Image (cartoon, grey):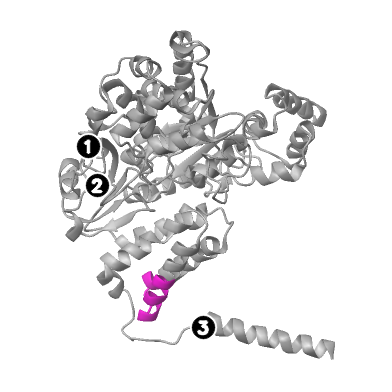
Amino acid sequence: MAENQASVIRQIVDQFGKDRSRLMNIVRAVHVKLGYLSEESIGQIAEALGIHRVEVRDMVSFYAFLSRKPTGKTVIRLCNAVVERMKGADQVGEAFKKALGISFGQTTPDGKVTLEHTSCIGLSDQAPNALVNGVPITNLSPKDVPMIVKAIRDGEDLLNLPQAEVDLNVRKTGDVIFAPMERGAALRKAISITPEGVINEINKARLRGRGGAGFPTAMKWDFCRKAQGEAHYLVCNADEGEPGTFKDRAILSECADLLFEGMTLAGYAIGAKEGILYLRAEYEYMLSKLERMLAKRRHLGLLGENICGLEGFTFDIRIQMGAGAYICGEESALIESAEGKRGAPRDRPPFPVQVGYMGQPTSVNNVETLCCAARILEKGGEWFSKIGTKDSTGTKLLSISGDCEHPGIYEVEYGITVAKMLAMAGAEDTQAVQVGGPSGRCLAPKDFGRGISFEDLPTGGSIIIFGKNRDLLECMRQFTEFFVEESCGWCAPCRVGTTLLLKKLEKVLEGHGTRRDLEELESIGKTVKTMSRCGLGQTAANPVLTTLSGFAGLYEARIKSEDYIPSFDLEKAMEAGLKAANRTLEGVHA
């Protein structure tokens, strides 16, 4: 058996050219074949690649979708993100536990079904939801569970389940993303001018990255094009893991042609011959459709060699699957993952445009950004610049979910107010709005007149609405718990600080907190924000800090009446411990 397994693994490794950088593909393929990654299989992968097993084990241990122990033939991953729990995911979870006779993290005695929790899977507009062997199951209720479990046990095709349906849910279309497209039009215009001309057109449009940070796209492409390297790469970040975000899901489902057009003209602009679409594991159900679209574009001469008849213009795209890690939405962590490593953020500088994928100049762009770029080349930078506001041109896709009548995707012009957005989504009696997901900010009603834009309220797209009957601080606790789970663990401010935030917040919510605890919550939050190494840690305290500012009364209502109760002083305790240790050492030396 061991010899047969080793042979299978060698074949998989050979399939990827014994390329160490394709380790993610290799371990995913082995996982599919064997059902999990044992220590033995890890050693066999390492031997076939000629690397140490620690490299493989280190990488495998990082990702949520790579199991180190046997699982059932069917794995149910129920989403327990904030919106899903607002919509009844906990009750659905209890129904699954009852129907299967197991708890979360366990496998049925017959070894057939494993039940797990997972974070946001990009379906918050259709909550509660789950992935069953990668198949999305939406709009669940406890009464659906017995039928689903029976279908699984009977070996039925999961795609035949009535709940195995993902609605597009585009509530409002605009002139940029969801407008009709003429395939190849933008690309033909791009190659009719120089690569520098393409960058100039993007600059004329004043396009800024749609991932949330808003860095000028033309500037990024120009930096990348001018950077010295043996090769240049274009990477599309399709790892939208921010809870409450699902706009890329709709683009990948309905506008993949526009995306691939944008990737190709970006490749032309920066001088890249290879593009990589990094697709989150939760969206694997879209993979075959995306591969078919790529094949069609190759057949039409829109990918490959001499694109659109332009001699020497060679560019192709491959899809790199992830394996379940929120941190890989950060561009340098994504690059590490695409190279077959842990998705741990890199120190910067150097930036990816200088030293990126495989150590070469790389432009990492958001899905929506690349779609905007294609539309700009099609209709012109001046046309695009007249949409939105002066500093935030174009449209923005918003993923709206939570307490509203019409959750879904809205393509709106930048500058729209929060109040108008709430009216469109059918949100009444709103207590708060989370703009930008957990890493964004929580707005009180007094701020609903503010606008969605880079100059006011920037967002990657996640909008979560909380009605007046919601326990807002409990939702913030769940957000903080999410950051604790998703921290890569590299730096202490994030690894330790998020845990301290969670414990302190739980103390307040349990009614044991004091005013001193609120002061310490703010102090810890600011430390985590300023001292963390990457964007995850730098935004992990936002749920606490923005609600301490905007909803102070909710915290005040939870604390004890005493103004101050002496609490454990960590700094003094550490100082006393150090003195005691020094006395002991002095005694030993004496």
Q: For the residue marked with disc 3, what is the amino acid?
A: Asp
Tell which circle, 3 or 1, labels the residue nearer the N-terminal end. 1
User: Regarding mark 1 in the picture, which secondary structure is present there?
Assistant: strand
Q: Which residue is mark 3?
A: 569
20 vs 326, left or right, is right
When asked about the image quadrant of residue 111, the answer is: top right
* In the image, residue 349 above or below residue 304: below
Q: For the residue marked with disc 2, what is the amino acid?
A: Ile
Tell which circle, 2 or 3, labels the residue nearer the N-terminal end. 2
Frontmost of labels 2 and 3 is 2
534 vs 565, left or right, is right
Q: Which residue is mark 1?
A: 412
Frontmost of labels 3 and 1 is 1
| Residue stretch in magenta | 507-523
Tell which circle, 1 or 2, labels the residue nearer the N-terminal end. 1
Residue 519 painted magenta:
yes
The number of numbered badges drawn on the structure is 3
User: Regarding mark 2 in the picture, which secondary structure is present there?
Assistant: loop
Question: Can I make out residue 166 in this image?
Answer: no
User: Regarding mark 3 in the picture, which secondary structure is present there?
Assistant: loop
Residue extending farthest right: 590
* Front residue (pair 335, 133): 335
Q: Main secondary structure of the magenta part?
A: helix
Q: Which residue is mark 2?
A: 452
Alpha-carbon distance for marks 1 and 2? Answer: 9 Å
Q: Are marks 1 and 2 in contact (CB under 8 Å)?
A: yes
Residue 495 painted magenta:
no
x 27%, y 24%: residue: 380
Q: For the residue marked with disc 1, what is the amino acid?
A: Val
Question: Can I make out residue 31 in this image?
Answer: yes
Residue 174 placed where, x, y %?
22, 30
Image quarter in which the C terminus is found: bottom right
